[in-house]
Image (cartoon, helix red, strand yellow):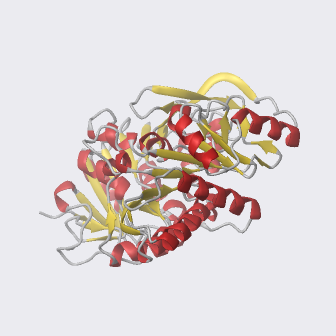
Amino acid sequence: MRKLCNSLKEAIEKSGLRDGMTISFHHHLRNGDYVLNMVLEEIAALGIKDLTVNASSLFDCHEPLLGHIENGVVTGLETDYMSSGIGGPISKGVLAKPVVFRSHGARPAQILDGTSHIDVAFVAAPASDPMGNCSGKYGPSACGSLGYAFADAMKADKVVVVTDDLMDYPLTDASITEDYVDYVVKVDAIGNPKGIVSGTTRMPKDPIALKIAELAAQAIDASGLLKDGFSFQTGAGGASLAVADYVKRIMLKRNIKGSFALGGITGYMVDMLEAGCFQAIQDVQCFDLQAVQSIREDPRHMEITAAQYASPKAKSSAASNLDVVVLGATEIDTNFNVNVHTDSNGCIIGGSGGHTDVAEEAKLTVIVAPLSRARMSIVVDKVLTVSTPGSSVDMLVTQYGIAVNPARPDLEAAMKAARLPVKDIRQLRDMAVALNGPAKPYARTSDRVVANVLARDGSLQDVIYQVK
């Protein structure tokens, strides 16, 4: 059986792709990905129209997608995250149908149960053999874990592996195996691995961010969860990474041996593994090149699928065994609802990713954020978009103090017993207003919905409206 195609065009033609179908992509190369643009360019040349793109995330490098929306090649988008370069035009109504936003756990759940159907999946594989056994750990474009691509490969009608490093058969350390793959294409380059790293995945130097991080680590310690067997995830934002550093110091000082670190993994988590803070890393996505090297070389650094990471329909998930997660927020309201989809003007600048999943599953969900950014309050009366419901959030840590969800009186008592600065979240809102003035009114320009934000169970959680 010959799976190897001479060109991307040949693979698309053999896949049977036609008007009105759904194609999918994963985002492990993040802002360095070439494959989505490459595939859409070939599809446009073939005259295929009216496609839905289901991508686990979309970055600024994918801005050529906007041209394919304009020319009718793409008429629908489904994703877990969308950067502002694409989110801005989408917010202004360039797409005829509303975007469908899911979480990183809900996406594989709905793909695997058939709710979200994929006709052709394109897997960007840094290494593959001619039969489609492929991995993200090897090759010049190595990106580490391929966790988000597994569900697509398992359930799509046709699967095309796109690689720039064709290895001899068999590739023995394969992530996705040949029994799921229909076609293989070798191209010059699938991406730039330097694009895996973004400005948000670096340790901050800002004294306010460091103060928040130290206070958050003290709160985690006071919660009673920081003990042998501790499991932990942080977001990739700078303040979250700084929390990990302070937690590491506590663990080393007390010789605490944690069980696992989880999530999109940075070098800071790798450092904690190598320092003996954790027995293992469960990795659905590598956020920097140190993590890529670690997953390739250290058997304690485990690749997991997005379903294993956080699917609400899985029999169990790593997220459901999580003690503490530290996450960021664009804004948080007095009911502890968190927005990570839109800015203060209602423009799309992100998405839930795994935020909603791990917030719901972890024993302790900590939001870290400064009280204001660019003279805009983080704490508001009502968030513009509910990304993560307040029922999943336990505390907010700012430079001015800690607000604990009233649903967790035990946690508030623990914070006060540790003599940490506990404040009512409405106090923090009032402080923000005093510092920044009242919030500007939301600049919504129509009742037209440009995006639907789905909850983990697939129900409609919120909508995003068109702006100027």
Residue sitting nearer the eye, 330 or 433: 433
Residue at screen point 56% across, 47% down: 366
Q: Is residue 245 left or right of residue 37?
A: right
Q: Is residue 376 left or right of residue 89?
A: right
Residue 448: image x %, image y %?
62, 23
Residue at screen point 55% across, 59% down: 236
Residue at screen point 33% across, 76% down: 298
Q: Is residue 144 above or below residue 72?
A: below
Residue 127: image x %, image y %?
32, 72
Quadrant for the N terminus in the image: bottom left
Q: Is residue 105 left or right of residue 443?
A: left
Q: Is residue 446 left or right of residue 190?
A: right
Q: Is residue 167 above or below residue 362?
A: below
Residue sitting nearer the eye, 246 or 66: 246
Rendering quarter of residue 114:
top left
Residue 394: image x %, image y %?
55, 40
Among all residues in the image, which is located at the extreme top? 447
Q: Is residue 6 visible?
A: no
Among all residues in the image, which is located at the extreme left? 1
Q: Is residue 406 visible?
A: yes
Q: Is residue 15 above or below residue 341?
A: below
Residue at screen point 26% across, 77% down: 167
